[in-house]
Amino acid sequence: MGRYAFFHPTDFEYKFAFALQPSSDIRSFGGVMRHSVAGDMAHEWEKRDMEDIMMELEVLINSLEIDMPKFESYQKTLDGTHRISSDLYDLLGSSHHNQTLVARFRLGCFIYHQLLYVEKLGVNYET
């Protein structure tokens, strides 16, 4: 996979936390893995995957002892995903929490939030 995940159709870019987060963390949030024609890995989610994503996020918030973000208070756009990213970084970026779990939690929040405004979400990885 790679150090970067490029989501489509939203154009959101995610950089995996160096030395803390393997790119395989993304598999924690369900969806389907596919090989592209070029042989690269791709991952896809649909709205029906949101329940599984939320279940994983709930496990993580119990471990981190934090509150779930209020997803409905963010615009259902790329700007909203960037805003939640900024807010989560401010909340958890330099905290005492396990930064590996924080990175996984942030990634799951980004996937979940994007599925609020697209029917299907895909991701390709830096090669």
Image (cartoon, helix red, strand yellow):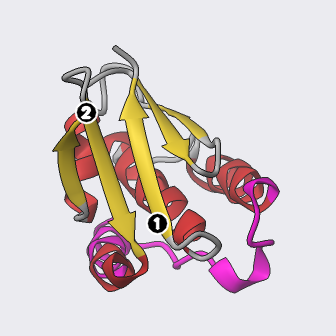
Point out which mark residue 120 bears.
1
Q: What is the three-letter code of the residue carrying label 1? A: Lys
Image coordinates for residue 1, horizontal then vertical, percent: 25, 25
From the viewer's perspective, tell me whether residue 85 is left or right of residue 120. Answer: right
Image coordinates for residue 127, horizontal then vertical, percent: 34, 14
Few, some or many C-alpha atoms within 10 Å of disc 1 (few <14, some 14-19, many ≥20)?
A: some
Tell which of 91 and 114 is nearer to you. Answer: 114
Q: Is residue 74 above or below residue 19?
A: below
Q: What is the three-letter code of the residue carrying label 2? A: Ser
> At x 27% / y 79%, what residue is drawn?
52
Mark 1 and mark 2: span between their CA atoms?
A: 16 Å
Q: Secondary structure at mark 2?
A: loop
On the image, numbered disc 2 is attached to which residue? 36
- The region drawn magenta spans 54-79
In this view, the mark in front (1 or 2): 2
Few, some or many C-alpha atoms within 10 Å of disc 2 (few <14, some 14-19, many ≥20)?
A: few
From the viewer's perspective, tell me whether residue 29 is left or right of residue 6. Answer: left
**Any magenta on residue 64?**
yes
